[in-house]
Amino acid sequence: MVQLRPRASRTPASAEAMVDEGPPASEEEAEHGLLLGQPSSGAAAEPLEEDEEGDDEFDDEAPEELTFASAQVEAREEERRVWETVRRDKTLLKEKRKRREELFIEQKKRKLLPDTILEKLATASQTDIKKSPGKLKEVNLQKKNEECEKGSGSKKVKVQKVQSISQNKSYVALRLKDQDLRDSRQQAAQAFIHNSLYGPGTNRTTVNKFLSLANKRLPVKKAAAQFLNNAWGTQKKQNAKKFKRRWMIRRMKTPKK
Amino acid sequence: MAAAERGAARPTGDNRTSRRRRRRREHCLRTSGLEPGALPGQSMRARAHVWPGRREAGAARGMGEFKVHRVRFFNYVPSGIRCVAYNNQSNRLAVSRTDGTVEIYNLSANYFQEKFFPGHESRATEALCWAAGQRLFSAGLNGEIIEYDLQALNIKYAVDAFGGPIWSMTTNPSGSQLLVGCEDGSVKLFQITPDKIQFERNFDRQKRSTIHKMIVDRQYMGVSKRKCIVWAVAFLSDGTVISADSAGKVQFWDSATGTLVKSHLITNADVQSIAVADQEDSFVVGTAEGTVFHFQLVPVTSNSNEKQWVRTKPFQHHTHDVRAVAHSPTALISGGTDTHLVIRPLMEKVEVKNYDAALRKITFPHRRLISCSKKRQLLLFQFAHHLELWRLGSTVATGKNGDTLPLSKNADHLLHLKTKGPENIICSSISPCGSWIAYSTASRFFLCRLNYEHDNISLKRVSKMPAFLRSALQILFSEDSTKLFVASNQGSLHVMQLVEGSFKHLHAFQPLSGTVEAMCLLAVSPDGNWLAASGTSAGVHVYNVKQLKLHCTVPAYNFPVTALAIAPSTNNLVIAHSDQQVFEYSIPDKQYTEWSRAVQKQGFHHLWLQRDTPITHISFHPKRPMHILLHDAYMFCIIDKSLPLPSDKTLLYNPLPPMNESDVVRRRTAHAFKISKIYKPLLFLDLLDERTLVAVERPLDDIIAQLPPPIKKKKFGT
């Protein structure tokens, strides 16, 4: 957007000046057109200023003669400069992003288990997918067996060995993805049972009502089994207690008259 | 009161007036809301409070007067029963609960719970079955098949079936193969090898004809307002399929044609479980209302060959859903959400009609869940995932026999100790001085030190436990709190010395020959010299702690031991068995005592032998060596060895002889067993000092009030 600068009062441009701007006007327009892509107010207004100044100071002289070629060269150089700055910016950004990603990868790697274990697990899972279900279970069973045995074997061995950092001696590795899936299925199954037993549509009643049925039909009617509801108004009771305590303290503090 | 005036034996349960007055007092206290120590939002705790001591007058013969701390703030709620499996060869019952605990009851040893496997949070057992060779398998919603090791009392292994949650499991008639029904619709066949199980085949849904007895998971059938869920299915060998569904129907289908043969609508609620007898002439179903129905195959007319299934007997022993039933040759077994295990012998199948053929209802645990520190008057309560430490209240008032004394200082909840991890606590104990707490789960052992400053308490855990001490079946501290005895589940017995902030392992007694029959029980003598350990088929072993070697072994008895204790000065070992026999064995002399021989010769009173619940704790009076105090769930008894033994004709529950009888007659009718049924149901009773008793009760109503909601029953007029 071209900034509106307070223009110096200029003498109404003579018709000649206006008209004479014809051929050089084309070059200026060419510049103008190019430079409009990167609106910098200075650049867009510059030629006008120059012209004006030129007009103001050197009213008598003819305007500067700019050949088409030089103007073109200048324009191209401008363009090239601008393009280069843009390219530099882009490369800078790219490098920054690259560095950041590398940093993230490093951090992630630090969190993971050492490569060897991951490889082991990965190969185990791959063989799972490939082999048939029957063998699959055997492999897994075997693997778990091995690990269990190694785990328990280490325990039977002397106490010091448990603290050694050797890989397959003191723990059993599980893939968390499998565990999550298993948990969610178990939760779903339990929710199904709970819903079908105690969910909506079942004819359930509270234990209090159940035990009080007998009381209602006795010749001498008795109260319900849980007559008092001790959970009623707990917040109110707590507030009352706190207020009482504060009031007592305040009472103690003020001197007795 | 009147009893004291007459100088008779302690007032017993037939003192009705005092009982009525007591109940009215209870009622008043409850309704006016004057409950000491009531916590907002915890209604059960508010109702259960420490009752001030009751003075009890004893017999003129020096039974003594005691102040009794009546404790009701142990908020014990057992978990509901989920599966039940009966083993015919050994007459044992495996019961699995909703928290994952599996208990084994020996039905021929007076229905005693001899073994148990602690629960785990992620284990949601759906099926339990016995295989050949006394092997126990369970399968659950976590997709794993678990085998239990009945000798080492731990889990042998867990095999993942890779089919998602497992809904049902059964074995073939010979017990060599295992069938499992999974969530993804497949039925998998496993071969049972001597060490493990091995996957054999995968069945699709269609190939069901090759399988004999199969119990299949849920199916959706016929849409009424709400989808009807088939809870249980049984397949008989003549091709009939019996299904029990949530609409309250028991339906008979013909598997060859796939058609419905007969339908019985037995209830409005769900029918949740089916169990068929071995001979396939009767089966039992359990409903959500708590009713158990017995169906029998009965000839149509008296001399025809044609038979039909007829619903014969209903039994209403439960208040909540009956989720598991089993059919033994002579009895119907049922268990459900209301946590009772009910065994109902069928009269037509029982040969000898004596007291054994009566209904058995097992509600309270057969082991001790409470330990007591006598010096500091502390009680340690063991729950599934935490421990609670309470200090008893105190009173300065005095009163006459039968009075309720007001508390000057209320009971204090000192500590709430949560375990890490999903496993249940197996056993726990507090030292007599109150400075050490030890407890164990299936994989870890914890030892903590307590420090008391004025009224504050601080806990510090001893961090490095030895590697061989993984899980313990029983923990016991010595009387002077310097030694800790741990029975580990590998069979060995460890002795540790406790020093200032840590411990030192002294010795490990290795397991001796003999199979593991029951959970290990330990007892230590008050002078610290002797240690007794039971649980194997070889009998009770007695070790010399000072010399760290085996001293002697009490001869084996064919019923498991339920309680064990060593008397203070005489060092007599008192053993109670599950058939209600009590033996006294002298450790220094290595033989049974005279009194014990006399009792065995005469035999116990028949009412004593007919008691339902086992004796769970034995203790002694420090100043009276002739007294033995023992209790079970519904009575406590002081045995006075100086008095004559009752014969079968005398009344066991000591009556109060009428006033006009002479002294001679009174002396003649009094006998050694002083029984009181005032405090029941008792979970724990012990002597704190010479004049104080502590009785921990757990009323059944308090347990029922915390159970899940039952089915609504409509009664006319309400």
Image: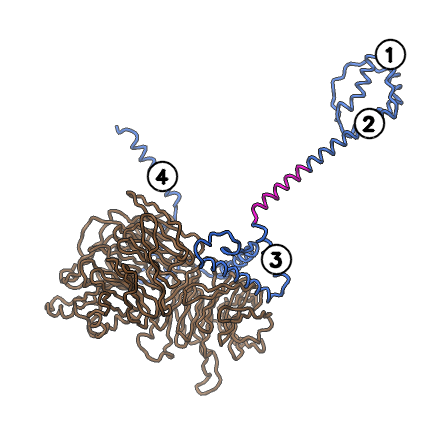
Chain colours: A blue, B brown
**Is B209 covered by the magenta stretch?**
no
- Name which residue type carries label 1: Asp
Mark 2 vs mark 1, CA separation in Å: 28 Å
Classify B369 as above or below B283.
above
Where is residue A78? Give x, y as percent: 79, 27
Mark 4 vs mark 3, CA separation in Å: 64 Å
Disc 4 or disc 1, which is closer to the eye?
1
Q: Quadrant of the rendered structure where residue B65 is? A: bottom left
Q: Which residues are magenta?
A: A95-112
- Name which residue type carries label 4: Lys
Q: Which residue is mark 4?
A: A242
- Residue B361 visible in image: no
Disc 1 or disc 3, which is closer to the eye?
3
Q: Residue at x 58, y 69 (%)?
A: B202
Residue A123 is labelled as 3
Give the secondary structure at mark 1. loop
Mark 4 vs mark 1, CA separation in Å: 97 Å
Instruction: Tell me: A57 left or right of B317.
Output: right
Q: Which residue is mark 1?
A: A60
Q: Nearer the viewer, residue B407 or B140?
A: B140
Give the secondary structure at mark 2. helix
**Could you classify mark 2 by the number of other residues whose Cα lies within 10 Å: few (under 14), some (14-19), or many (20 or more)?**
some
Where is residue B164? Give x, y as percent: 55, 62
Does label 4 or label 2 sit earlier along the sequence?
A: 2
Does label 4 or label 1 sit earlier along the sequence?
A: 1
Give the secondary structure at mark 4. helix
**Could you classify mark 1 by the number of other residues whose Cα lies within 10 Å: few (under 14), some (14-19), or many (20 or more)?**
few
Mark 4 vs mark 2, CA separation in Å: 82 Å
Are the residues flagged by discs 4 and 3 in contact, CB closer than 8 Å? no
Mark 3 vs mark 2, CA separation in Å: 62 Å
Same chain for labels 1 and 3? Say yes or no.
Answer: yes
